[in-house]
Image: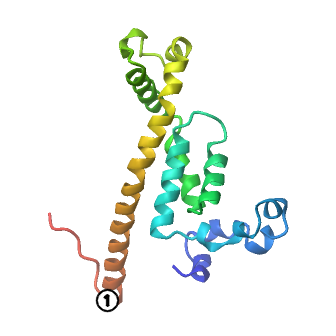
Amino acid sequence: MHPKLWRRSWLGKYLRHLPRVKHVRGTWLHRRLGDRLLHSELWHPTRRRFAGGMAVGAFFAMIPAPGQTLGAGLLAYFTRVNVPAAVAATWISNPLTMPLCMYVQYTLGCLILGHAPGEVPTHDLMIILKHAPFTFLVGVLPSAAILAVIVYPLSLVLWNLSTAWLHTHHACRAAGRPPTRARE
């Protein structure tokens, strides 16, 4: 969608409240990070930069520390991948998914250290962290790297599928007929 048409869409009422380049120029953040902060390559998604941003965000999502979003945004800025994708991908770890992530990290830490995962009761995550914090921390970085490696090609595939769907949808609308659906 063309940027000027965003104002008239349902998304426009939210996008008009975002800061524009003229508002960011000259601020403390602009002075610290430089003109590269304003380059469109960081903010407008392309296929590879979007997938890279998703991978950076997925990596930081698995690190159980405050400031995941800030860390993902800074690494996306320095590696020149899509910053909004990196920030959004940190939402993979939320209060609903974090217990599963922590259990997987603990189990992976046990495999790396050669411990049996059944030595500590696994029904309560706080007991796991109390009895085996080192085992949990050993599993954090490998799980983050594995998730980032999985998310990158998955993002590329989803980008291709969504692009193909959009082209088909727009071609059908231009021809004046409804988009065809898969036969059941």
Q: Residue at x 40, y 58 (%)?
A: 155
Q: Is residue 16 above or below residue 91?
A: below
Residue 139 horizontal/vertical position (percent): 47, 29
Residue sitting at the far left: 184
Residue 81 horizontal/vertical position (percent): 56, 62
Colouring used for the render: rainbow
Residue 32 horizontal/vertical position (percent): 81, 59
Q: Residues within 10 Å of mark 1 (few under 14, many from 20)?
A: few
Q: Quadrant of the C terminus?
A: bottom left
Q: Residue at x 64, y 59 (%)?
A: 77
Residue 147 vs residue 113, the one in the foreground:
113
Residue 11 vs residue 94, the one in the foreground:
94
Residue 43 in sight from this viewpoint: no
Residue 42 vs residue 112, the one in the foreground:
112
Q: Residue at x 45, y 32 (%)?
A: 101
Drawn side of residue 139 relative to residue 181, left or right: right
Q: Amino acid at mark 1?
A: Gly
Q: Which residue is mark 1?
A: 176
Residue 110 horizontal/vertical position (percent): 41, 20
Residue 91 vs residue 110, the one in the foreground:
110
